[in-house]
Image (cartoon, grey):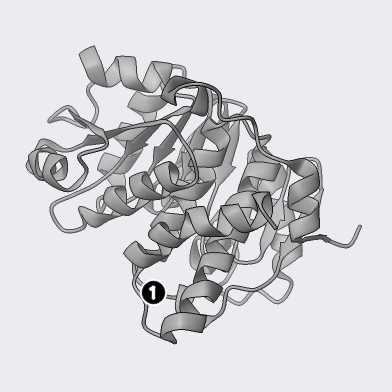
Amino acid sequence: MSEPTEVTPDVLRRWGLPAPGGDKKSRGDVAVVGGSQRTPGGVILASEAALRVGAGRVGVLAPGSVSVQLGAVLPEAAILTLPDDASDPLEGAARTKVEGADAVLVGPGFDDADETLETLLAVADTGPRCVVLDAYALGVLPRLDRDRLPEALVLTPNREELALLADRGPDIDDLAAVVREVAARYRAVVTCYDVVAAPSGEVWHVGGGGPGLATSGSGDVLSGAVTGFVARGVKLSHAAAWGTWVHARAGERLTDRLGLGFLARELARELPLAVREIERP
């Protein structure tokens, strides 16, 4: 089994990022599907993160109970309402948004497993180009036929979600080995903490970050950043590594200035500065 490749600023510079082009359409279109009355903030953080890493457009699909509120706090995004019954197909503007998106993130802010599964199936039935799964959408993935999802699939689990996907207990001694196993099982690129793995068996290690990243909403920022890089046209494994690195670097920058106790919304705002460190050393 090969050792993980270290993701460094030099590696990221060598990979590079797509040219931004002349307008927002050329920088990628993201759809974020999630939200609930209990946790509406997940889609806000993920959507902002996608824009902060350079995605051109974001649309949020959320339950009607929160969609009106989102428009006030996400003026940069199109806000669309999910069907009242999660098992109903996506129609109209919601379907058009998912069909046209370069990357669709499903999961941030959902808080009901059955509704999440039905919504994920409805998204899958539109034939999306790429799907990124986070939070509750990861929890229901073992209940879903993998072939219902596109080949372009990215997973962003924490350790508990990784253990569920690997069908094992919570104690994981060799994180890289388990991430590689889950990537192969689900034919997906997987990023978990400091490890990124591709279905081919390639593994990367991303250093840095620090304990401040263990804060509410941090995972939503990570999944949004990864989705934003995918939408910009970055290769899936490289997009996961880019997203993981800039998320970690944002945490380091905030720790240097504020110490422990920064907020996930501050992480999102730090992402473009982390990207600029690579583009303008």
Mark 1 falls on what kind of element? loop
**Rendering coords of residue 18 (x, y %):** 64, 31
State the residue at coordinates (24%, 28%). 87
Query: Is 227 left or right of 123, judged from the image as shown?
Result: right
Of residue 270 and residue 113, the one placed in the foreground of this image is: 270
Look at label 1 and name its amino acid: Thr
**Rendering coords of residue 117 (x, y %):** 35, 39
178 shown above or below 169: above
Of residue 223 and residue 171, the one placed in the foreground of this image is: 223
Q: Which residue is mark 1?
A: 215
Residue 265 in view (yes/no) = yes
**Rendering coords of residue 234 (x, y %):** 64, 34
State the residue at coordinates (22%, 12%). 92
26 shown above or below 198: above
For the residue carrying disc 1, how many other residues have a C-alpha within 10 Å: few (<14), some (14-19), or many (20+)?
Answer: few
Query: Is 41 left or right of 154, judged from the image as shown?
Result: left
**Rendering coords of residue 110 (x, y %):** 27, 49
